[in-house]
Structure formats: structure tokens, C-alpha cells
Amino acid sequence: MKQKRIVILFPSKMESRFFNIPNITVRYTGVGLTASAYATVKTIRELHPDILILAGIAGVYTHSNLKIGDTVLVSAEHEADLGIFYEDGFKHMSDLQLDMSFKVNRFLNCPYIKPDMPLPAVKSNSMNAAIAPFVNTTDAEIENMEGSAFFYSCLQEKQPFLEVRAISNIVNTDHKAWDYEQSIRNMTDGIYKLIDYLNQ
């Protein structure tokens, strides 16, 4: 059976440091939603992958049952800090009754996740301001800084895609408690399992 043409995007070289499959193309988005959107579209148009995977670390919200080191697929992304502050607080664009010619969706969904995939699937918030205290975390379990731009770009380009995240930290300001080393190792193992699944 012909192997799929898989391309993996990492936000940073740090997150790719344990990945080593010679026939898999690796590119980097840079950190943040703007950089991710540009890199995603550029990669799609230059490489035409069968499947494009974004892989990186993420924070976990305290209401989730996930723990540091867990690796997941992202089923839906929400650009959580997109909105406006009012006297009574922050309102997301999807909650505003504005006279606009377009509607801002709360979540973008990944249509390429199947029930038998080797990693559990969760919803994520995407943030330019990580750990921002004003966003709605109710429907998401994790947060990252690239995912919603990646989802949006792939959906617009009709590019099959998946997103893998490993939990490196609880979403709080205690940065000493972050576990980069093990979470990146676990994420890499998760990517290997996913690639094996995709090539079956």
C-alpha cells in the first residue's frame, strides 16, 4: 500500500527535537496565530500533503481530567481571546450581536478524526495571550497558541489535517512546574502512533 504524504508542522524546533522519521517532511510555524496561519497556507500550497499534522505542547485547564504528559488529538479549536472588553467584562465575538456580514463561530471542528484513532480527542482554546484570565474555558480542556489558525487555514484550503498536543503544564502562572522534556517525548510517541495508524 502506498504511504500517505504526511507533513508535520511544529510551532518551534524545541517541540520537534525528538522526532526522527526520515521520509516525513517537517516544517515550523513559529508561535502564535498569525505565524501559524501563514505557515499553514504556505505549506499546503508548496507541498500538497495528503495529511497535514500540527504537533506541539499545550496547557490543561484545572476542570479537565487530563494530566501533564498526556497526549491528545484536538477535535475542535476556539480562538478564545478574540473579542471586545465592555464595562461588565470581556465578550467573545461569537457572543456579540453585531451587524456584520459574517458570523464568528465559537468552535471550528476537525472532520478527519475517527473513533478508532490511537489518541483521545478533546476541544481546545487557542490564544495569542496564553493563560489570559478573561476567556471562557467551560467547553475546552486545553489551550495552545496556534491551533485555531491552523484549523481555519486547512478548512479554507480543503486540506485534510489533524492536531496533536501533549500537556506540558496546568494553565496558571507557575512556569516552574512546566514539564517540557517529558511532554515533548510523549507528544513524539503520539505522533509515531498516529503515523502508523494513518499508513495502515
Image: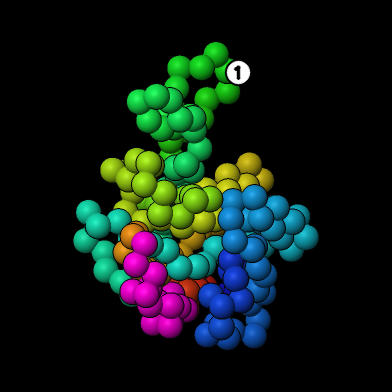
Q: What is the total number of numbered labels drawn onto the structure image? A: 1
Using the image, determine if residue 135 lies above or below residue 25.
above
Farthest-out residue, right? 46
Which residue does the image show at 51% across and 67% down from the upper left? 55
Q: In this view, does 111 lie to the left or right of 135?
A: right
Between 121 and 12, the one nearer to me in the picture: 12
The span picked out in magenta is 173-188
Does the stretch in magenta take in 26?
no
Using the image, determine if residue 63 lies above or below residue 30.
above
* Residue 160 in sight here: no
Report which residue position mark 1 lands on: 101
Residue type indicated by callout 1 = Ser
Q: Give coordinates of residue 135: x percent, y percent.
A: 38, 42
Which residue does the image show at 58% across and 55% down from the upper left? 32
Q: In which quarter of the image is the N terminus?
A: bottom right
User: Mark 1 falls on what kind of element?
Assistant: loop
Between 3 and 131, the one nearer to me in the picture: 131
Q: Give coordinates of residue 116: x percent, y percent.
A: 34, 63
Q: Give coordinates of residue 27: x percent, y percent.
A: 67, 70
Using the image, determine if residue 186 lies above or below residue 154.
below
Q: Give coordinates of residue 154: x percent, y percent.
A: 61, 49
Q: Is residue 197 left or right of residue 161?
A: left
Which residue does the image show at 32% across and 45% down from the upper left? 137
* Residue 187 in sight here: yes
Which residue does the image show at 26% across and 64% down from the upper left? 66
